Image: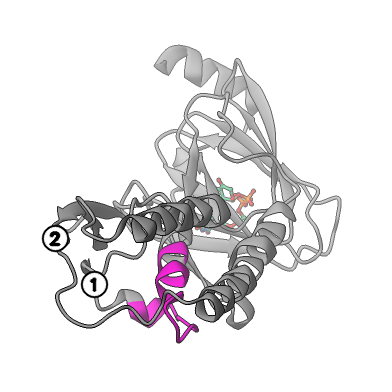
């Protein structure tokens, strides 16, 4: 387990079970992959190594065997990083499985459907209610880009969203500031570029339009998804408009406030980038 990894998940190299269990197992995994979109090979392999602190942030509600499905889905939704290791699987020497009877299988599938409804269907509705651009779509202007924050979805108990210096935030954060109380819907903010400053801008509530201009390309982005930030690196003219009343803009910056880093005149900006490109 290295620092870059949050959990290790095993997968059975070869299952030593009667053929019908192998077939049921394969069908089950195929359905699970389809329903829950797993990226791991073997959701039910009980060989796992998981960092303890993950469970301070991820809450598991299930008490039956489908807790594995709930756990791996929530790990994926939180963008946790994982590796997989192959493990040997041996014949059962004693006893027999309590699981393989019709009523248990039926109950499991009903529970799985309820789980899918709660953590996939309702979750995707929440995500899709974001009206803006697909943030993964390529940013066309220079000196920008998208970052995605890690978040833990606790459903009705709220979301916990995390940015860390030099990790998902690609610089050391020296300053944060936020803009709220945007009661004037005609407010225009920004209209400047920076000479050196690196920043990431988020809309953590409500929405606004971010206009980017690198001197050649221009791009408008509807900011309405709190899990994505847009890089505002040096030499990028940026303007913010169309704020919703409940909008809260959060900015992370790699340096302290220095007025002489601002270029507040558009012609001077063009002159500056021509000289410094
Ligand atoms: C940016 C966009 C996204 C300070 O004294 N310290 C600070 O850290 C900041 C950010 C501002 N100020 C002062 C400077 C001005 O007298 O606060 C006043 C308002 O700043 P400004 O008109 O630059 O605000 P915005 O919203 O147009 O721009 C701000 C940031 O200043 C800027 O760096 O990229 O948000």
Helix, strand or loop under label 1: loop
Instruction: Residue at 57%, 70% (x, y): give it.
Output: 109
Q: Earlier in the sequence, mark 1 or mark 2?
A: 2
Could you tell me residue 7's position as x and y percent?
Answer: 25, 63
Q: Is mark 2 within 8 Å of ligand 1?
A: no
Asked if the magenta segment contains residue 65, the reply would be yes
Quadrant containing the C terminus is top left
The magenta segment is 55-73
Q: Which residue is identified by label 1? A: 51
Q: Nearer the viewer, residue 13 or 156?
A: 13
Camera-nearest residue between 61 and 53: 61
Please tell me which residue lies in front, 7 or 11.
11
In percent of the image, x 39 and y 71: which residue is there? 68
User: What whole-number distance in Å separates the C-alpha atoms at marks 1 and 2?
Assistant: 9 Å
Where residue 176 sits in the image (x, y, percent)?
46, 61
> What residue is drawn where x is 77% and y is 62%?
182
Residue bearing mark 2? 1
Q: Residue 171 versus residue 273: which sits nearer the camera?
A: 171
Percent position of residue 60, x then y: 45, 81
Quadrant position of residue 115: bottom right
The quadrant of the image that shows the N terminus is bottom left
């Amino acid at each position: 387990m290295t620092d870059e990894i949050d959990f290790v998940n095993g997968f059975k190299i070869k299952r030593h079970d009667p053929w019908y269990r192998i077939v049921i197992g394969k069908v089950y995994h195929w359905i699970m992959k389809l329903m829950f979109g797993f990226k791991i090979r073997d959701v039910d392999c009980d060989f796992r190594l998981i960092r303890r602190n993950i469970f301070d942030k991820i809450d598991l509600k299930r008490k039956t065997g489908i807790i594995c499905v709930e756990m791996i889905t929530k790990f994926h939704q939180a963008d946790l990083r994982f590796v997989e290791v192959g493990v040997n699987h041996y014949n059962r020497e004693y006893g027999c499985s309590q699981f393989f009877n019709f009523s248990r299988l039926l109950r499991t599938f009903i529970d799985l459907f309820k789980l899918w409804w709660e953590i996939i269907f309702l979750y995707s509705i929440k995500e899709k209610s974001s009206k803006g651009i697909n943030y993964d779509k390529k940013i066309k202007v220079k000196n920008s880009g998208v970052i995605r924050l890690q978040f833990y979805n606790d459903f009705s108990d709220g979301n916990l969203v995390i940015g860390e210096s030099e990790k998902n935030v690609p610089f050391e954060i020296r300053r944060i500031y936020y803009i709220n109380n945007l009661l004037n819907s005609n407010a225009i903010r920004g209209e400047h570029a920076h000479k050196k400053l690196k920043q990431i801008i988020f809309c953590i509530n409500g929405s606004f339009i971010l206009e980017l201009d690198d001197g050649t390309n221009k791009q408008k982005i509807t900011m309405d998804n709190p899990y994505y930030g847009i890089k505002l690196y040096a030499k990028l003219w940026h303007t913010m408009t169309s704020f919703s009343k409940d909008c809260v803009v959060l900015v992370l910056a790699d340096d302290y406030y220095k007025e002489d880093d601002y270029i507040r005149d558009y012609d001077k900006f063009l002159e500056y980038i021509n000289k410094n490109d």
